[in-house]
Image (cartoon, rainbow, N blue to C red):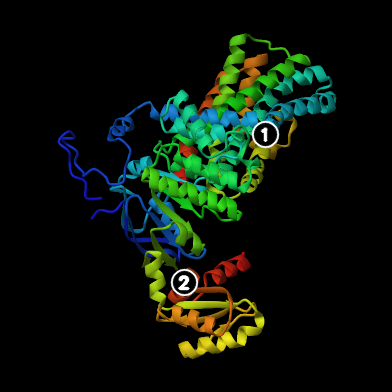
Amino acid sequence: MTTATQTPSTPTTVKPAPTGTGAPRDEHVRRRDPFALVRHSLTLTWRNLIKLKHQPEQLIDLTLQPVIFIVMFVYLFGGAIAGSTHDYLQFVLPGILVQTVVFASLGTGVGLCEDVAKGVFDRFRSLPISRYAPLVGAVLGDLCRYFVAIVVVFVFGTAIGFRVQTDALAVLATTGLVLLFAFGMCWIFALLGMTMKNPRSVQGIAMLIGFPLTFGANIFAQTATMPGWLQSWVKVNPVSHLTDACRGLLVGGPVATHVGWVLLWAAVFTAIFAPLTVRAYNRKS
Amino acid sequence: MTYAIQAEGLVKRYGKTTALAGIDLVARQGTVLALLGPNGAGKTTTTRMLATLIRPDAGHATVGGYDIVREAPEVRRQIGLTGQYASVDEEMSGFENLVLLGRLLDLSRADAKARARELLERFQLTDAGGRAPGTYSGGMRRRLDLAASLVGRPSFLYLDEPTTGLDPRSRGDVWDLVRSLVTDEGVTVLLTTQYLDEADQLANDIAVIDHGRVIANGDAAELKAQVGSQSLEIRPAHADRTADTVAIVSELTGLAPDLATNGLITVPVHDPDLLPVVVRRLDEAGIRASELALRMPSLDEVFLELTGHRTQDDAQKEADAA
């Protein structure tokens, strides 16, 4: 082993060829590959979906939870709250759609924290891939999970009598809006997952955030029926805006202002928490 | 002389704790360098640093000629990590884990699958490939870890306590695999271990680490030489001849030998020529020995000599504290 000398066939390398490498140097070309981030992120998205396949209980959790909530609220409380279970279903279903996705986004933080705790992220960090790829992959994979949850809510709701009053385009718009909001929200939980040591603590803290967001909103009851102090929170709660937007889109009513607020909140969450998450991820050292 | 791995004055502090207090290391290409030391000595921090997972607060290091901070992507391209540094995913099958890594290393889908199958076969995991690593035995799990680190055909392999918790047979299997990687493929291995015999078995060079510093360097023989004398061990075949044997040994060495409860007589010797003399005298006295050897000091003794404390004590203390 000697200090490597330049062979004439590799003319203008600035640094001496490294010792102890069997890898061909043409791999430098790959580093410039602009699609690498996309490709690696999609590969890691695939990983997150594979995990869903291997842990069917996760999928059951994802599908059964909204079903239980719908059954419970519609048949248990619906009559008392709205006088008729059928009427209440029309009111509560767009809200449960929102609640389901907010709770599903808690899982993003727990999943990330597990990956860090188990050393899986260290493996990724030791690979020659972009440091953003594991995060993007995790979030994209979770968007697929959220989508499954949305479909479950629509299918089950329709089966027991929920009727979209608008059109298919509005259903698509609702799905897109909910996914967009969930994308923003999940960064809050991703940051928790990156900064906390124990996945169970992440779950605990995420629940503490998730409950006031979903129950302290207009998902289950009209804001007007609540005491003033609660109303003031419910009115600023981003989840309320999303619920109003979904109601407007699905059963009719004002939409534009609420959609505006939702887009703003999603942008704010992403702008604040995505960079913080990336920073926490890079600092894991 | 350029080394495959070269580290100078690596320092890492966590708040007031100094994990590394200036580590200097070199590893020659195609050899095994063992970092030997008790828990908390700084082995893992050093290795994580050389794997670009953490940055040094001071000092610098190169792996394969590339700087671990400025040229981290090039370093990552050349290294394979196992075990505690970089785990396989429990929620995917062994095969899927290997395919995932292949895809992340830019193999095509077909190539990634072929490479995964090849590695599973090589590590005798073909039948287990479809199952999740959670269902594997300790030895299988370690082999999968090793396979995962080899997907990208690394020139450098970092092994973190590769045989901790394995039964002796699996341990031997892992050792054989590591040896074949070094001899057949010229891989440079950085190995951390608490087991002195593991370093002795595998390593060309050993760096003894304690409290974030390298306190000794060299191959196993050199380290043993630092401690000095060898010892002569004799166990008479019949316990009633023990006293006679002790008399002969003390007469020849001028020292009072240690007598263990199992009948093993141990005495330090400085002159290797003493052994034939001892054999002759025992023969003359009609004493048959069931065990008779001139032994190099164990690395455990080396560690005690170098640090003033035993490796096990530290491990025990940490276990007690936890």
Q: Chain of mark 1?
A: A
CA neighbours of label 1 inside 10 A, class few (<14), some (14 to 19), many (20+): many
Query: Viewed as shown, does residue A151 lie left or right of B123?
Result: right
- Which of the pair B17/B53 is nearer the observer? B53
Residue B243 location in percent, x, y?
61, 87
Query: In this orientation, does residue A219 appear?
Result: no
Instruction: Find numbered disc 1 in the image and state the secondary structure of the residue it sits on.
Output: helix
Gap between marks 2 and 1, in whole Å?
60 Å
Residue A56 location in percent, x, y?
69, 30
Name the residue beneath numbered marker 2: B303
CA neighbours of label 2 inside 10 A, class few (<14), some (14 to 19), many (20+): many
Look at 35% across and 49% down and name the residue there.
Answer: B30
Q: Quadrant of residue A204?
A: top right
Q: Are marks 2 and 1 on the same chain?
A: no
Query: Viewed as shown, does residue B85 lie left or right of B60?
Result: right
Query: Viewed as shown, does residue A237 lie left or right of A39?
Result: right
Query: Viewed as shown, does residue B192 lie left or right of A82?
Result: left
Q: Is residue B9 above or below residue B70?
A: below
Instruction: Find numbered disc 2 in the image and state the secondary structure of the residue it sits on.
Output: helix
- Which of the pair B11/A275 is nearer the observer? B11
> Closer to the observer: label 2 or label 1?
2
- Which of the pair B14/B166 is nearer the observer? B166
Look at 57% across and 44% down and name the residue there.
Answer: A113
Of the residues shown, which amino acid type is indicated by label 2? Phe
Name the residue beneath numbered marker 1: A214
Query: In this orientation, does residue B86 appear?
Result: yes
Of the residues shown, which amino acid type is indicated by label 1? Thr
Q: Is residue A213 above or below residue A19?
A: above
